[in-house]
């Protein structure tokens, strides 16, 4: 693991708080570029004289983002055909087929 990747891992929570939802480029334990797309991050890094292969590129998740396993099945009989797996243990999920909207609710 490179120094920058170790630094990202160590500082991940603060990166999420500060840069959530954006892409960042890290070189030598410093955030050198922040943008909405990976291309912009790398373009900014090049303008700063950094080689693309020296930049650790990361899409920083937002604090309220979460990962889940999903599967699709046309046999479910709903317009969006979403079948959640472990997500049902953590959230109450409201499917609004008419609005084509899914709402994830917590007890908090």
Image: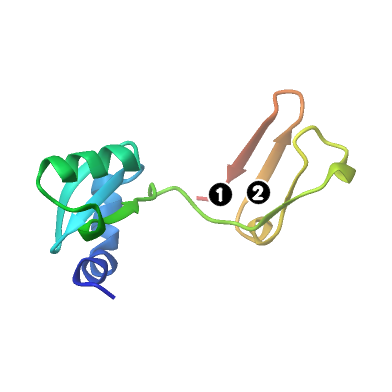
Q: How crowded is mark 2: few (under 14 residues within 10 Å), some or many (20 or more)?
A: few
Apparent side of residue 81 relative to residue 43 in the rendered image (left or right): right
> 23 or 52: which is nearer to us?
52
Task: Report the residue at 69% width, 39% height from top.
Answer: 94
Most extreme residue toward the left is 48
Helix, strand or loop at disc 2?
Answer: strand
In which quarter of the view is residue 47 placed? Answer: top left
Q: Is residue 44 above or below residue 2?
A: above
Task: Report the residue at 76% width, 24% height from top.
Answer: 98
The location of residue 11, given as percent across then percent down, is: 23, 64
Question: How many numbered circles does the render carry?
Answer: 2
Q: Distance between the residues labelled 1 and 2?
A: 6 Å
Image quadrant in which the N terminus is located: bottom left
Apparent side of residue 90 relative to residue 11 in the rendered image (left or right): right
Task: Report the residue at 72% width, 37% height from top.
Answer: 95
In which quarter of the view is residue 14 placed? Answer: bottom left
From the image, tell me which residue sits under label 2: 92
Task: Report the residue at 13% width, 63% height from top.
Answer: 28
Apparent side of residue 4 relative to residue 102 in the rendered image (left or right): left
CB contact under 8 Å: marks 1 and 2? yes
The location of residue 84, given as percent across then percent down, is: 70, 53
* Mark seen at residue 67: none
Q: In this view, does 60 lie above or below 39?
A: below
Q: Residues within 10 Å of mark 1 (few under 14, many from 20)?
A: few
The location of residue 100, given as percent across then percent down, is: 70, 28
Helix, strand or loop at disc 1?
Answer: loop
Apparent side of residue 8 relative to residue 65 in the rendered image (left or right): left
From the image, tell me which residue sits under label 1: 106
Reading the chain from its start, which is encountered first: label 1 or label 2? 2
Q: Is residue 74 above or below residue 85?
A: above
């Amino acid at each position: 693991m490179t120094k920058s990747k170790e630094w990202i891992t160590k500082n991940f929570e603060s990166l999420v708080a500060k840069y959530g939802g954006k892409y960042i480029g890290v070189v030598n334990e410093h955030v050198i570029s922040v943008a909405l797309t990976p291309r912009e991050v790398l373009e900014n890094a090049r303008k700063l004289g950094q080689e693309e292969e020296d930049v650790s590129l990361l899409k920083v998740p937002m604090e309220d983002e979460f990962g889940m396993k999903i599967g699709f099945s046309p046999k479910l009989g709903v317009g969006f055909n979403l079948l959640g797996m472990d997500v049902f243990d953590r959230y109450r999920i409201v499917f609004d087929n008419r609005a084509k909207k899914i709402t994830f609710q917590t007890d908090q």
